[in-house]
Image (spheres, grey):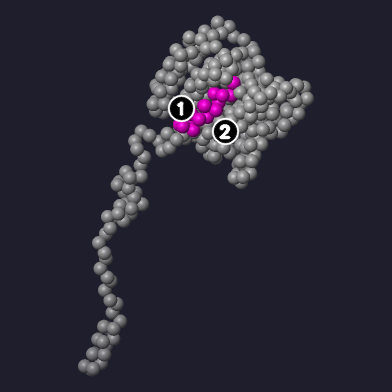
């Protein structure tokens, strides 16, 4: 019996598992990482962006400003293009060339086709900024000066902000709206002073251009938050290609072409610079900082266009331009600081 008990004890001792090794002391950096993954207060504070500033706001604002720069050259380039082309030919060929550039980008990047639910929005973008705005402003420049057209289109930011508020349901602050209305009032007063209180057929074209362009900007800004901005521009241009190709064939058969250096440079810029590059960086920046706030950056566009019209076209500027420039820049500063 004693021997059997000893054997049983030895067997039990043999099958008893060894005690687990002692755990190493916790690593502070590992503990912090675990706290971050678990959603601890310390981890949340480390992952949060600085207060009062959205991630990438500076870069997106810079992109939107680059778009404004590209757009500011559109009217002088259009005037140059009209030296070689008729208004309908210039707009149609411009759309075809811009679609060709966009198509190369779409194919090289193997961009997927947009979802069916996005095609209606792309049609609004194409009708507004690819066809409607270029056509109406080109027709207006046949009777109005570049400077006059630039200040009328200065009302575009307020129009875009209003349509964006209706379309997206966002409500900018009262300070934002006060500054936006003040900036539009400065531009309107400047326009009224320049036109001696009378509206021309060119002004009607420009007011129509404001509405269709604001609709295109608003819808494009919404789509740019769902897909890359360059794809919004690219697919809108491709969607309009059947219209622009047919329009080019018809317009070129009716309007004579007189080639010149200015005409070629103007066509190249409005196609590649304004229509593709400008819209690409504009929609990308607008998706990051919001349609309403980005639209207020365009308050500087008329003043930039005035400078280009003086340097490139030799148009004279009146005493009211520096005064309007000061007022508009103040409004831009206010709208950029106003929170939603």
Residue 293 can be seen in this image: yes
Q: Residue furthest left?
A: 2
- Residue 198, position as x, y percentages in the image: 58, 6
| Left or right side of 158 for 25 | left
Q: Is residue 103 above or below residue 251?
A: below
- Residue 82, position as x, y percentages in the image: 67, 20
Under circle 1, the secondary element is: helix
Q: Gap in Å between the C-alphas at discs 2 and 1?
A: 20 Å
Residue named by callout 2 = 277
Q: Is residue 26 above or below residue 190?
A: below
Residue named by callout 1 = 293
Residue at image x 48%, y 21%?
Answer: 300
Residue range highlighted in magenta:
61-76
| Left or right side of 159 for 86 | right
Residue at image x 52%, y 8%?
Answer: 193
Indicate whether residue 70 is drawn in magenta: yes
Residue at image x 58%, y 24%?
Answer: 74
Dominant SS type (magenta): helix
Instruction: Identify the image quadrant of the N terminus.
Output: bottom left
Under circle 2, the secondary element is: helix
- Residue 109, position as x, y percentages in the image: 59, 45
Indicate whether residue 218 is drawn in magenta: no
Which of these two is toward me, 181 or 116?
181
């Amino acid at each position: 019996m004693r021997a059997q008990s000893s054997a049983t004890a030895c067997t039990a001792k043999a099958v008893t598992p060894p005690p687990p090794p002692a755990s190493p002391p916790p690593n502070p950096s590992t503990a912090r990482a675990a706290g971050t993954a678990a959603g601890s207060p310390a981890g949340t504070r480390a992952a949060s962006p600085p207060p009062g500033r959205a991630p990438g706001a500076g870069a997106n604002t810079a992109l939107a400003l680059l778009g404004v720069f590209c757009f500011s050259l559109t009217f002088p380039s259009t005037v140059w293009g009209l030296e070689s082309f008729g208004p309908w030919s210039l707009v149609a060929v411009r759309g075809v060339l811009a679609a060709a550039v966009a198509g190369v980008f779409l194919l090289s990047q193997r961009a997927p086709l947009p979802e069916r639910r996005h095609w209606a929005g792309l049609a609004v973008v194409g009708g507004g900024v690819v066809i409607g705005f270029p056509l109406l402003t080109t027709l207006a420049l046949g009777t109005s000066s570049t400077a006059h057209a630039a200040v009328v289109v200065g009302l575009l930011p307020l129009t875009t902000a209003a349509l964006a508020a209706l379309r997206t349901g966002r409500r900018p602050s009262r300070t934002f709206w006060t500054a936006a209305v003040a900036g539009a009032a400065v531009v309107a007063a400047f326009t009224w002073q320049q036109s001696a209180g009378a509206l021309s057929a060119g002004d009607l074209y420009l007011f129509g251009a404001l509405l269709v362009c604001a609709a295109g900007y608003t819808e494009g800004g919404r789509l740019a938050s769902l897909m890359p901005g360059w794809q919004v521009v690219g697919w809108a241009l491709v969607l309009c290609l059947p219209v622009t190709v047919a329009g080019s064939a018809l317009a070129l058969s009716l309007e004579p072409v007189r080639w010149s250096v200015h005409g070629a440079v103007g066509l190249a810029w409005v196609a590649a610079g304004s229509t593709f590059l400008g819209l690409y960086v504009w929609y990308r920046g607008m998706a990051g900082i919001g349609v309403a706030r980005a639209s207020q950056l365009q308050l500087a566009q008329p003043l930039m266009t005035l400078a280009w019209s003086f340097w490139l076209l030799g148009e004279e500027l009146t005493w009211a331009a520096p005064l309007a420039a000061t007022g508009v820049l103040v409004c831009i500063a206010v709208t950029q600081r106003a929170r939603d």
